[in-house]
Image: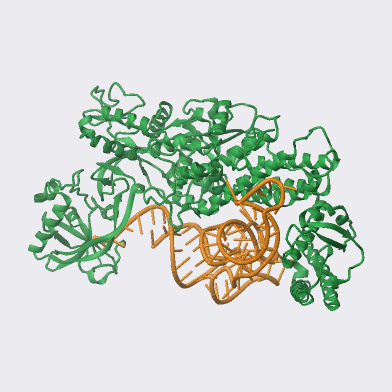
Chain colours: A green, B orange
Amino acid sequence: MTELNRTYDHSREDEIYSRWMEKGYFRAQPNSGKKPYTIMIPPPNITDKLHVGHALNNTVQDILIRTKRMQGYEALWLPGTDHAAISTEVQVVKAIAKEGLTKESLGRDAFLERVWEWQKEYGGTIVKQLKKLGSSCDWDRERFTMDEGLSDAVLEAFVRLYDEGKIYRGERLVNWCVKCQTTISDAEVEHEDGEGQLFHFKYPVEGGGFIAFATTRPETMLGDTAIAVHPEDERYSTLIGKMATVPMVNRQIPIVADSYVDPAYGTGAVKVTPGHDPNDFEIGQRHNLSIINVMNDDGSINAAGAHYNGLTREDARKKIIEEMTSLGLYIKTEKINHAKGTHDRCHVIVEPLIKLQWFLKMDELANPALEAYTSGKLKFNKEQHGKVYAHWLNIIKDWCISRQIWWGHRIPAYYCPDGHITIGKTPPEKCASCGSTELSQDEDTLDTWFSSALWPFSTLGWPEKTPELKYFYPTNVLATAQEIIFFWVVRMMIMGYKFMGELPFTDVFINGTVRDENGVKMSKSLGNGIDPLDVVEKYGADVLRLTFASNSPENDSRFHWDRVEFSRNFMNKLWNATRFVLMNLEDYSENATAPLEMEDRWILSRLNSLTKEVTEKIDAHELGMATQKIVDFIWDEFCDWYVEMVKPRLYGDKEAPTRRAAQHNLRRVLIQALKLLHPVSPFITEDLFLALQDKEETIMLSPWPEYSKALADPAAEKAIEAIQEAVRAIRNIRAEKQIPPSQKISVVIQPTTTEDIFAKSTHIVKSLAGASSVEIRQEALELKDAVFAAIGGANIYVPLEVDTEKEKARLTREKAKLQQELARVEGKLSNQGFMAKAPESLVAEEREKLEKFTGMLAKVETELSNL
RNA sequence: GGGCGCAUAGCUCAGUUGGGAGAGCGCCUGCCUUACAAGCAGGAUGUCGGAGGUUCAAGUCCUUCUGCGCCCACCA
């Protein structure tokens, strides 16, 4: 047994973590004979720095994995990172720009070398930071989406999906970033509200007259191929089917009827540009309109824009307004609030463009993923998240999986000069169609999420049939944030069923969002987040973890430093409680056995219930509840009550069996409580565990406590409850009478129950209520010299000089309170519906209360009249 | 516009088969009681957003209104 510092400090966390790593406690092996329990870390971007969401998410996972490890499972928590294609590429492009270099000037291979260098230098920060949190990942199995094995899995998946016709190449309107020269997924488009201009124009219509419309993007008028109106809009019914003219390019376009158009908005007529607007694209599909792309990849106008060829989109806009004005076709410009789609990395306005892209057909693949949820095989910690998951699957569209960037898995498609496509994991020697040996590989790479979608099995060795894969797949829990449900959870489910024939995990834990003090989500882009490592630095990882865990990580929450302080205070409390126990174990002998007292059996019974509750709550992924219960037990029941109850025994005769029993039980209860707390606060519990015993070398692998029926002791619980009530009553009297703690008082207890619990517990009352003597008497005391209090099991008399007036007021208050309670109970018992339909136990409980309150009221009334 | 939520003590939040309203912080009172002042004991504070409904019983279930939040989409 070791000496502990006077106050808690977290300086030993790194040392403890290193020891765990050296000992290999985090490692998990297949076929160990134990049951597997697996969690896959949601791969953070290799470029990420730890932010508050990561910290919360990892706290959740570590709690789950540590619990299962202690419960004897072969617990694997597999860590890793993804290559964050777009974000990384953007950052490296920025970095080389400082040297005056561009991607193109470097060339593909040299650029990729720079990316690897860059990621070696800056990547991996997050991994170190996760270790600071105490994350018990199996770091030997750490993976990276761009490493050899995972890259092989990506190619394998692509080839298989292509061979089955699930992957196709198609022209699609995609979000195009003119700065990054890449398509971006819908997800990467940020909608920023801002002031915009709505330009009103009119086109001439055949047979005379005009049709007016409005647009925020005049430059796309060059690609207009129709005007659309609502089919039931009477204003335009005569115009439907007629042709209008786009003057700049002198194009004849039809006026079509489509119910997409909102007749109430603007003029009720919409220009249709299928080449540059997603909704127009859909209208175009319905009416067989031609698609005209008027823009180059850099956003400038192309040859389809006639005399605007070569202008930037901004210049073209100005010139078009000028031309329309000169033709008398310009009406007006109004200012509007306008949501602009911008690229979330570079904030340049997104341009919808027609491009040849690779797509993954989702409809059939999505079926088993949806079925898994509806059948209950896939469970979410909250039903609301399951709904979101199902919603996404119900409206799923084909997934554009190609990206026009270099950093990532290059699409394994090879083209011959005739444009035939040959697909292969390795570069084919000749074209599969024409035999040409002049092959060039597709320039595009795959969406990062494509590789992430394979994560649950690619990290375990797929497509190889490894023992790991067989043993650990499907995994148990996937813990992530709600905005990732569509991006990642849905896609992992789809790929899991596709390639493994089985779902990748059975439980999804969606953790809440951490907000700042104003209730705004903490995010990197807003910069309103706290740095979790600052908290670790100042307070320790245990404190950070307890703060998250005790504040229901499954719910949204605000980050509050008050809570951090509270967590720290709790650590100190626990630390000092252990110091106290250790101080009293100096002459401890493990072999000495002694019969347990009532309070010992009480705390054991309470701890036993706690063990059951905590285990159940953790299993049910209700971590907030579990944590709060542990904290309450340690602070309230153990420290504030049990330790105080046991003090007189500890300070008594050294060799007394009752003292030996107290020593034994203090240690036993504390160790078990530490075990329950360990998943939440691993470091302090390890430290204290090692100080309290020397048989086991770590708490991490120490068996998780189990509920034992034999330890449940309702009688002891009831007895101690009565004593607690008595103590509170006496403390109340002391507070009201302003008796300082140093002044001892004498107490007379008149039990109203037949059990002699008070006679057995005078040492407790003395210690906790500051009594010099506790007398148990069957007959009542004269009240004129004593303050009286009635509790459930006894009447309490504290002999003091009584201020009659004050005492009268106090008893009157007491009487009113009791009368109120009685009225409620009586009301219930006279309620026929209640008596007929309420469960019997509830009725019995109410009857018991009736009896109790009646007795107490009678007593108070008697005392009142005696005054 | 589509989807998912939230509204409980001054503040931040718990409250999971419907059965006497809770915690932390803050506030008031008294204590440096030999583990802990990062502490101990005691205390005050709520028409559980409004209105209906189901039920013997509603913070908890249903409907509706009001005010917020998040995700996705979007105005030609």
Question: Residue A340 vs residue A140: left or right?
Answer: left
Task: Indicate the quadrant containing the C terminus of chain A: top left, top right, bottom left or bottom right.
Answer: bottom right
For this rendering, which residue is in front, A36 or A424? A36
Question: Residue A609 vs residue A101: left or right?
Answer: right
The location of residue A20, given as percent across then percent down, is 57, 30
Task: Identify the residue shown where x is 59% and y is 47%.
Answer: A621
Which image quarter: residue B66? bottom left
| Vertical placement of residue A46 versus A185, above or below | above
The location of residue A783, given as percent across then percent down, is 85, 72
Residue extending furthest toward the right: A779
The location of residue A150, given as percent across then percent down, is 42, 30
Looking at the rendered structure, the number of numbered marks drawn on it comes to 0
Which image quarter: residue A120? top left
The location of residue A622, given as percent across then percent down, is 60, 49
For this rendering, which residue is in front, A32 or A686? A686
| Vertical placement of residue A514 versus A409, above or below | below
Please indicate, yes or no, whether residue A136 appears anywhere in the rendered image: yes
Task: Indicate the quadrant containing the N terminus of chain A: top left, top right, bottom left or bottom right.
Answer: top right
For this rendering, which residue is in front, A284 or A734? A734
Please indicate, yes or no, whether residue A256 appears anywhere in the rendered image: no
| Vertical placement of residue A157 versus A543, above or below | above
Question: Residue A792 vs residue A97: left or right?
Answer: right
For this rendering, which residue is in front, A203 or A344? A344
Question: Residue A824 vs residue A573: left or right?
Answer: right
